[in-house]
Amino acid sequence: MNAQDGPERLAHHGNGGKRGAISRATVPLRTPLFRGERRLRIALVCMPNAGKSTLFNAVSSTAPRSGRLAGTQRAYEECTVQIGLDEASVVELPSIASLHHLGEDDLPALKYLLWGDERPAVSLHEPGGPPAPFAPPDLIVQVVDATRLESHLELTLELAQLGRPMVIALNMMDEAWNKGLHINVKALEKLLGIAVVPTVALMGQGISDLFTTAVATVRAGACPLPQPASKHICDSLQRLSQALNRPEMHAAFRVPHALLLMQVAAGDPFFHDELAQHFPQMLPQLQQLRSEAAGKLPRPLDEELHADRHHRAATLFEACTRMGAPHEGRGWRYWLDELFLHPQWGLIGSLAVFAAVLFMVFEVSAWLDSETSARLVAALALWQPSSTAGVIGRAVADGLAGLVGIVVPYMLPLVLLLVALEEAGVMQRIAFVVDRGFHQIGLHGGVAVPFLTGLGCNVPAISAAAKVSKGRERVIASVLITFVPCSARSAIILALAGKYLGGTGVFAIFALTIIVVALMGRLLARNRREFGPGQVQEIPPYALPHWRSMLSETWARTEDILTIVTPLLVGGSVLLALLHHVGADTAINTLFTPVTAWWLGLPVVLGVPILFGILRKELSLLMIYQALGTFEVGSRLDWVQITTFLLFLTFYIPCISTFAVMLKTIGRKEALVSVSLSVGVALLVSGAVRLLLEGVRLFPV
């Protein structure tokens, strides 16, 4: 990026425009791999208010670890982050303005950058343990406020003396652009010998590039170019440098010679005290040499060093920046990013996409349903076999019709829409915006797409969640998706609640669903046995979707329907039809009496619709009419019973197809736990609401 680039260009960085989950490109294997015990350790360092916490939160795991550096009240946070095939432990250190003359609260941050948990000889006498309970960083990421670049470059010059690989995150580039500040990143990189990555951490831009560059920097072993003081200062410090350049002193401090020289020359209290304690015989000589150096300069040595650092930072700033007109070069990409990535406006953009998904489910899909599966069902209604063979044949036809009813109107259009939004780069932006909210239920924003898919059908939603998560996160996502009301359950809610409970009733049921999903997520996250790594979410460039790749990805996400769901759907249909054929209805209703009549307060005849709901939820609605002997459900059920029944069906086992996919993605044990959980939640929520509503009816306010 050069000085003419606008902030909207930031979204174009990273892997040549890779398109998230859609991409099928081969990723080259670079070694050594940084994983497990060999994972990298990256320290985030910055001056106050540069966006370090925002950057950390954008990549952190759902439960970062926190603590305090030894000897200070300043806290740090640490988490493992997945960076392609590599892993890194990212440590967010407290903000620090300078490495010189640090106070008691700031000094432990420098000690960690120098030594980590490996205490040097000069530090062994200090009470307590090392500054932090983990190794020193392999790389330092300095987060720089691009609008205050000149002052931040002073800290850059100091950090360069630490002798560790380093990358600069040039943050808040959008604000710099708005102010007319144009930064030539390539020129700055060349002058410092440090990779500089433009970012807008608040909007997720450039973050993927930043961490990819960080890993590459460590692999290359690239350290910053030496940044010596001006010649007149170096000349004056020559004798002091020679006196400090002793093996025993380097062994005691274990810091680069350039840093040791600058700290002693500046009269840093910590280094002065350690010299007095460990090298008392040398201290008078060092103080004399420092006085001699100061005598050759126009002002006190400490002030001269600071002025020189300020001058060198200003020179760097002038060499790589220019002032121009603000708002230059804004295009449609910029305004779309304002809509989808802005912390506040992004929620509105996400809601707009959510509305488009609902429109697809309840309008387009409903029309397709009327033109496909509804016609099949109407045609099959004329076939009323009486023989066992005919009943089995009709059951097979019903199962296949049910398959068409799931796939054609609800699954394919919705998945195709979401794939198109992913290829266009929209869904990745939504995932970034909702990431922090999803962290509250133990998940990453990457599962936002599967959750939206679940509004159409839970089957492809669980399959999609399995591809973007792993471990306990995969289990939590799969379990929670089963509580997302799919199109079939939504159709029942709209059909019955819309007619008998009104708009308020429909809203209340969907609102309660959201509350249950959130509470279950918090509960499951709290009981997690392990924590997955954070994710560096890539913000790809906007692009026009390609039909070939869209169709290929849609098939990849729905092929489980043919391989897993079809046999179970047809088999379940045959089994339930045979039960009905041999007159087992009464036995089924009797078996479900404790649930229907005793706990839910429903007519006993609704036991069969509840059982058939396992096969496919739409069957429940048809069988309600059959069991009650009327299409006017309100004449047989009051508003409390309708509400109770709808809530039970909403949280009850989604369908046999969903269970089958869960068996494949999370295993038998977790799938059975999920089913038990859904039954328990359905009984608890519907029963509790029934008791509450009965109380309201008996004792109106």
Image (spheres, rainbow, N blue to C red):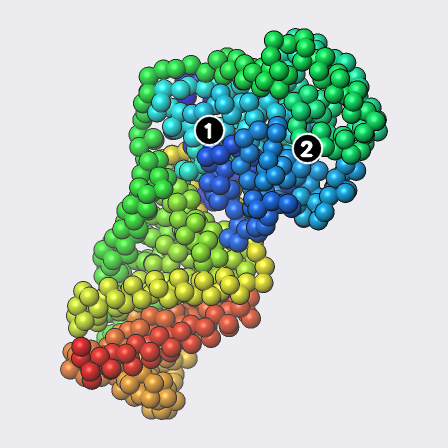
Q: In this rendering, would 177 be left or right of 170?
A: left
Q: Which one is nearer the viewer's eye here, 168 or 606? A: 168
The kind of secondary structure element at disc 2 is: helix
Amino acid under disc 1: Asp
**Crowd class of label 2 (few under 14; some 14 to 19; many from 20; radius 10 Å):** some
* Image coords of residue 604 (percent x, y): 30, 88
Q: Quadrant of residue 194?
A: top right
Residue for badge 1: 145
Quadrant placement of the C terminus: bottom left
**Crowd class of label 1 (few under 14; some 14 to 19; many from 20; radius 10 Å):** many
Which tag is nearer the camera, tag 2 or tag 1? 2
Amino acid under disc 2: Phe
* Image coords of residue 101 (percent x, y): 61, 29
Looking at marks 2 and 1 on the same chain, the residue that comes earlier in the sequence is marked by 1
Q: At 27% from the left edge and 67% from the top edge, which residue is drawn?
A: 509
Label total for image: 2
Q: In this rendering, would 497 be left or right of 73?
A: left
* Image coords of residue 590 (percent x, y): 36, 91
User: What is the C-alpha distance between the residues marked 2 and 1?
Assistant: 29 Å
Q: At 40% from the left edge and 25% from the top edge, which residue is drawn?
A: 176
Residue for badge 2: 270
Report if residue 538 is visible in the image: no
Report if residue 673 is visible in the image: yes
Q: At 20% from the left edge and 84% from the top edge, which residue is drawn?
A: 698
